[in-house]
Image: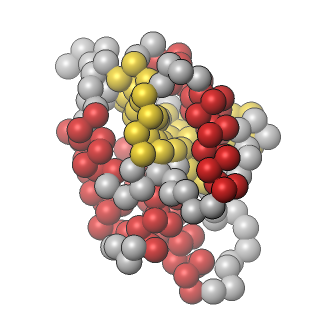
Amino acid sequence: MTESTRLRVTFVLGGARSGKSRFAENVALQSGLDRHYLATSQIYDDEMRERVALHREQRGEHWTTHEEPMALVEMLAGIQSEERVILVDCLTLWVTNLMMAERDVSVESARLVDSLAAGAGHFIFVSNEVGLGIVPDNRMARQFRDHAGRLHQMLAAKADDVFFIAAGLPLKMKG
């Protein structure tokens, strides 16, 4: 496998409004590959609808957008290509969607990370780092934090590059 066809995985972590999505979009742009955006959000209200529209407008027209709240493995398998960069935004929303649907987050997380071994192209995953605050006061919030933390560790182990974004500034953690 040549460098141009080798699977590449970039993982971008940060807090809310840290600049992680913009950073990830710039990584995708710099790849020179055909850009695909895989959104995991579900729209439940007008405010979220406006956020999605704004994000889409800010990205511009040179992206192909896919929306998939839960079946990431299947979606990625169907759209991956050596000529594409696929930006998945964001994994913490995906974890939330799985939990709300009462799916086994540990199994789905392992499936996602394991599926990368057969991948082609460049994948960029964006996620919120949720483990830097206080211990949540309720069971579901603690489970969410735990699921996200385990997924982040598994993905970071497989990723070529890992960045932590704070105040719009990237800290390269791996790569």
- What residue appears at the point 74 percent right and 46 percent down from the top-left corner? 17
Q: Where is residue 42 in the image (x, y as percent from the top left)?
A: 51, 57
**Horizontally, is 172 left or right of 64 in the view?**
right
Q: Foreground: 66 or 127?
A: 66
User: Image quadrant of residue 160?
Assistant: top left
Count all numbered tags in the image, as a single digit.
0
Farthest bottom residue?
Answer: 138
Farthest right residue?
Answer: 167
| Image quadrant occupied by the N terminus | top left
Colour scheme in use: secondary structure
| Vertical placement of residue 83 versus 44, above or below | above
Residue 162 seen: yes
| Vertical placement of residue 128 versus 173, above or below | below
Q: Position of residue 84 (x, y in %)?
A: 35, 23
| Vertical placement of residue 32 versus 132, above or below | above
- What residue appears at the point 24 percent right and 41 percent down from the top-left corner? 77
**Horizontally, is 68 left or right of 111 in the view?**
right
Residue 153 seen: no
User: Image quadrant of residue 172?
Assistant: top right
Q: Position of residue 102 (x, y in %)?
A: 38, 77
- What residue appears at the point 28 percent right and 50 percent down from the top-left corner? 73
User: Image quadrant of residue 118?
Assistant: top left
Q: Position of residue 57 (x, y in %)?
A: 63, 30
- What residue appears at the point 53 percent right and 72 percent down from the top-left corner? 144
